[in-house]
Image (cartoon, grey):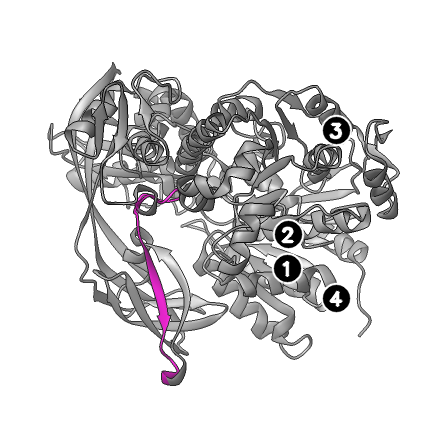
Amino acid sequence: MKKKSLAELIQDLRTNANVVNWHEIEPQDARTKPIPESVDARIREALIKRGITDIYTHQHSAYQAVQKGENIVAVTPTASGKTLCYNLPVLQAIAQDETSRALYLFPTKALAQDQKSELNEIIKEMGTEIKSYTYDGDTSPAIRQLVRKAGHIVITNPDMLHSGILPHHTKWVSLFENLKYIVIDELHTYRGVFGSHVANVIRRLKRICRFYGSNPIFICTSATIANPKDLAEQLTGEPMRLIDDNGAPRGRKHFVFYNPPVVNEPLNIRKSATVEVNSLAKDFLKNNIQTIIFARSRVRVELILSHIQELVKHELGTKSIRGYRGGYLPQQRREIERGLREGEILGVVSTNALELGVDIGQLQVCVMTGYPGSVASTWQQAGRAGRRHGEALILMVAGSTPIDQYIVQNPEYFFDRTPEAARINPENLIILVDHLKCAVYELPFREMEAFGPLDVTDIMDYLTEERVVHKNADTFYWANQSFPASNISLRSASQDNVVIVDQSNVANVKIIGEMDKFSAMTLLHDEAIYLHEGVQYQVEKLDWDHNKAYVREVDVEYYTDANLAVQLKVLEIDKTREREKGTLQFGDVTVTAMPTIYKKIKLSSFENIGSGPIHIPEIELHTSAAWIELKQVDPDIGTKTLENLLLGIANVMKHIVPVMVMCDRNDIHVVSQIKAAHTQLPTIFIYDHYPGGIGLADEVFRRFDEMRAAAKNLIQKCPCKDGCPSCIGTEMEGSHLKARSIELLDRL
């Protein structure tokens, strides 16, 4: 059978009844300037050998600003050559003075490896002795010493900087004495919990630079977010110049919203997005069109991967379609990235791990399973297709969730809206105390010394009382046996990960991945089905105390899904606002979570085929929350209807809130209670899923009316009669839940 071209497949798609919005982005020509006169001849030669005779306008502006000694943040779309914005000034500095040093920070190891190969190619073309090394958990001990003594450019990630470099700064004297530039790539990823930690790691880094007498310039790059300059200033504590005159070319892009057909009219249930993605992707792959498929969760990635491999195994072979997500081991990921660049791999199913700028070459089609959760993320994923000049297709297949339906029914909300602002709260007390301990361990802390904008004297006095530090005259010294950085994870609320051990082959027991403890409660309990690279494993035993899950390969027709029971107690109320029918409040709460049962769900039909209990101790979380309590409830509403009404509004809020405050859906949770413990009133709680909170619930309190209006709009626009999975999630015969939800939101 003759293979179809992408242009033909795009024409076929135009006639598809499920396409609800077709948005074309016009191609754009490159805008360039000559390479600046001041650039060293060797660098100029290397660029010309690589076919670069002129540079894009944004690369030119970045170079000129850095030469003037300004800190910059460059913001342009995916694949627009941001790398040269920092490689050019850094290589120039080293070419002029070979004692100069630079530190590159990437959010993930994959990205660091990827950028290193590109940098080394330029250095090789230059024919100079500039040494660039990656320093992360995979670096062998033999090379580590070499990096510390002789690396001109040290490429690492925030986790390694935090626990492997700063605490041992005395071994890195030549780096810190001569540090000219600190490069922070993919700035937009530093938000929420992770960003709040990293801002404190940077404070510690600057403190050590001052100690060794250096004052480096920051060069940041970011994908499109609403507040790149603010975020860069908050993260680095330095004034920034914004560079956003994008000169990179782009081909024509078709951005298509696809809404699966309704299969159950009364309930407004649509065909599963996963099933539609499988059949759409199969068409592209069978025509040899390189395609990336994004899915929201690890489980979903593995489900789609196993389905597509099954569909195309006779035509293409399963090796040409691969999965990619966190939890895969480094060499597996490198091999997949290389296969994509070289065209051996035709399709990849990924979580947002491939959203970042890892170079995976020229993909023609990007299929998203559902809305990625933020405008910024969606553009990042879309940027993966049609990276240079060719035509590209981006398909977003909506799920049944409220937010997916809202986006496809209100395309203007998506296309006319600037991407969200990224938020961090480096002053979160738990995070701040952790990093102050690390700072004192690294260098004695003087009494009036600044660490960010807050006065930290009280914290230092508290640490002295706790005998963690010892005060002598006006200086605090570390006074504890422990090594503080090793107990602090920058990325999650829980400090330790569960390691997944595969014992399918007794002669070859191996570790295949890891997972944070909170996720392990629902994904790695005894009897759970864990998916890895499309292979099913059953958890034989979860050793909760020793953070190990023992798994064995199985082949079953179902996956598992667990329920979490959550209890909330209000500890303190900090802010209150009265409403007609309720009271909006913000304060501190304690959340107790415990997994209760798991269900077995059939892969083909998604029906429930069994269940079982989970035996794991409860976990307690002390955090901040915003909540709305109802003061007056219509006495005619029965308890069951009221409970469903609260559940329905909570269901919509759960989807609206992460979009409004730009956070991961796991960073913020929504729970409804028919009788809250502290007032016995019906209440909906929205809380930060992180010890001490990171400012998300506070944002909800401030912008509650905006979120309430978006929730009301979503319910009103849903085509169902009286509630369905795409809006309030439930329906009750004769209860008018949908109308009552809208009325209640009005009165709040």
**Label 3 belongs to which residue?**
58
Range drawn in magenta: 487-506
Secondary structure character of the magenta stretch overall: loop
Residues at discs 2 and 1 in contact (Cβ within 8 Å): yes
Name the residue rendered at 79%, 42% in the picture.
252
User: Tag 2, which secondary structure?
Assistant: helix
Q: Identity of the amino acid at label 2?
A: Asp
Residue 510, magenta (yes or no): no
Q: Reading the chain from its start, which is encountered first: label 1 or label 4?
A: 4
Residues at discs 1 and 3 in contact (Cβ within 8 Å): no
Q: Which mark is residue 114?
A: 2
- Gap in angstroms between the C-alphas marked 2 and 3: 22 Å
Q: Which mark is residue 576?
A: none
**Label 1 belongs to which residue?**
337
Residue 493, magenta (yes or no): yes
- Gap in angstroms between the C-alphas marked 2 and 1: 9 Å
What percent of the width, then of the height, locates residue 89?
A: 71, 32
Whether residue 678 is situated above or below residue 599 in the rendered picture:
above
Q: Identity of the amino acid at label 3?
A: His
Whether residue 551 is situated above or below residue 524 in the rendered picture:
below
Q: Is residue 29 visible?
A: no
**Label 4 belongs to which residue?**
287
- Gap in angstroms between the C-alphas marked 1 and 4: 21 Å
